[in-house]
Amino acid sequence: MNRVLRGSLSALGCLLAAAVAVVAIPAPHAAEPVAISYRGDLAKLARLAPYPAVAPVGLPAAWTPVSSGLAVGGANGAGTVTWQLGFTTPGGSLASLEETNASAAGFVRRMTNDGKALAPTLLGGRTWNLSATPARGQRSMYVTGPAGVTVVVTGNATWAELRELAASLRPVPGGG
């Protein structure tokens, strides 16, 4: 009986030591954002978008692409093509390009988190609508084109960073 009790106590001691190690030693976190390639999604966008798609061109290397997703149909409805491209900015904030041929009003409302409308701004010869959602630290710029495409540039990035991303947008060859 003594032998069984000692074995059980030894096993319990090992489990407690492991539990303490798990709790006491923090898990490592990535210090730097992990860059992704969005070339594949961009190529699909050029083939599938029924609208004149846009993508950033010439952003400085300090803009790190960290996410990309292309959805055909889905939550935005049949016949829609929606692309999301996220960046970490040089200042360490997040900025995202969102574009679709879905219904503009609903898409803008979702992407801006019902942001409060601000005075529009002129950028590259186009008037961009601005909105802010202070409770989330979110700023957004959006424009809807005549071909039914809506482009939203949004995130917790500064206005200057969002303008830089918006100003870098160029037509995707083969799109629309």
Image: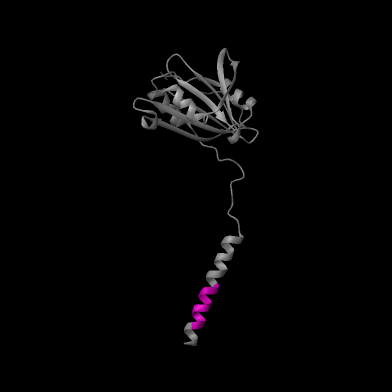
Q: Position of residue 21 (x, y in %)?
A: 58, 64
Residue 60 image point, x, y percent: 61, 27
Span colored in magenta? 5-13
Q: Main secondary structure of the magenta part?
A: helix
Q: Residue at x 42, y 15 (%)?
A: 147
Q: Is residue 129 magenta?
A: no
Left or right: residue 141 compared with residue 43: right
As rendered, which of 118 and 126 lies closer to the eye? 118
Residue 34 placement (x, y as % from top left): 55, 40
Q: Of residues 125 and 132, which is closer to you in this image?
A: 132
Looking at the image, can residue 28 be seen? yes
**Residue 54 shows in this picture:** no
In this rendering, position of residue 102 left or right of residue 98: left
Q: Nearer the viewer, residue 48 or 160?
A: 160
Q: On screen, 101 above or below 27?
A: above
Name the residue furthest top.
125
User: Where does the C terminus fall, quadrant-wise?
Assistant: top left
- Residue 44 lies, in percent from the top left, at 40, 28
Q: Is residue 6 magenta?
A: yes
* Nearer-the-camera pick, 148 or 124: 148
Numbered marks: total: 0
Residue in view at x 49 percent, y 85 percent: 3
Answer with left or right where residue 112 lies relative to residue 160.
left
Quadrant in the picture for residue 146: top left
